[in-house]
Image (spheres, rainbow, N blue to C red):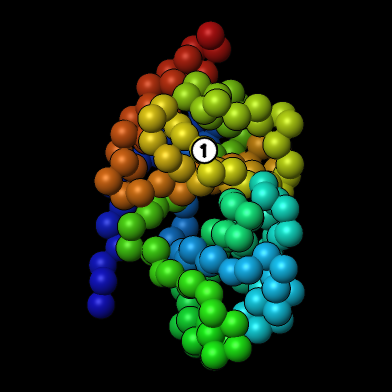
């Protein structure tokens, strides 16, 4: 069995109810590539909602799916649902070739909440968060690191980042949070 490693498992940034940054709850993570014109077939077979437009995110049956490319979805799942998703994908493959890759081992999540969360993200993020849909998603960069950004609400975000860059992203958030703390 693989052991989850989280480079910031025991760290937290909390500032007067304005900002709360902590490691996101662990989950299974998948990258799905599927012919966009057959998206509904994938939804029915896999039991999840797949947004049709890049930048949108949907939640259903313990799954969160974000459209991050014309034929690509980033999927978060409760760990107890991962094996069922893999089995459904294997069954579907006979009818429609596709790619479902378990990327749980390579990524970790950081959850940001509070009215200063968007400000903190914009310290190193080139995305206008006010214009981003909620719920919504984007494959983007934080400083020079590729991330998947999930926006659940105007004050609730999640960053998905490769484990090897997790400490770098966390340290940048921690550094920028000092300005939030000082109300600069």
Q: Position of residue 109 (x, y in %)?
A: 44, 50
Q: Position of residue 125 (x, y in %)?
A: 52, 28
| Residue 47 visible here | no
135 and 68: which one is in front?
68
* Image point (50%, 21%), residue name: 123
Q: Position of residue 142 (x, y in %)?
A: 45, 32
Instruction: Say which element carries label 1.
Output: strand
| Residue 58 visible here | yes
Name the quarter where the N terminus is drawn: bottom left
Q: To which residue does mark 1 refer?
A: 140
- Please tell me in which quadrant of the rendered image residue 63 appears: bottom right
Instruction: Note whether 25 is above or below 79 in the view shown.
Output: above
Instruction: Note whether 55 is above or below 105 in the view shown.
Output: above
* Image point (38%, 30%), residue name: 144
Residue sitting at the far top: 184
User: How many numbered markers are drawn?
Assistant: 1
Q: Position of residue 72 (x, y in %)?
A: 57, 59
89 and 143: which one is in front?
89
* Image point (48%, 77%), residue name: 82
Instruction: Note whether 74 is above or below 178 in the view shown.
Output: below
Tell whether 100 sits left or right of 154.
left
Label 1 CA crowd tier, 10 Å (few <14, some 14–19, many 20+): some
- Please tell me in which quadrant of the rendered image residue 42 appears: bottom right
Tell whether 83 sits left or right of 61.
left
Tell whether 170 sits left or right of 30.
left
């Amino acid at each position: 069995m693989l052991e989850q490693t989280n480079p910031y498992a025991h760290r937290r940034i909390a500032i007067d109810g304005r900002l709360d940054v902590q490691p996101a709850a662990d989950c299974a993570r998948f990258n799905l590539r599927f012919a966009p014109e057959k998206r509904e077939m994938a939804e029915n077979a896999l039991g999840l909602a797949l947004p049709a437009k890049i930048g949108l995110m949907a939640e259903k049956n313990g799954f969160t799916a974000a459209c991050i490319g014309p034929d690509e979805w980033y999927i978060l799942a409760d760990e107890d649902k991962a094996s069922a998703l893999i089995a459904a994908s294997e069954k579907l493959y006979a009818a429609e070739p596709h790619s479902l890759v378990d990327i749980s081992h390579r990524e970790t999540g950081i959850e940001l909440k509070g009215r200063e969360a968007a400000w903190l993200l914009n310290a190193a993020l080139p995305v206008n968060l006010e214009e981003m849909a909620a719920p919504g998603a984007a494959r983007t960069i934080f400083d020079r690191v590729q991330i998947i950004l999930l926006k659940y609400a105007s004050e609730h975000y999640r960053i998905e980042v490769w484990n090897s860059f997790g400490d770098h992203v966390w340290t940048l958030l921690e550094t920028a949070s000092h300005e939030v703390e000082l109300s600069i």
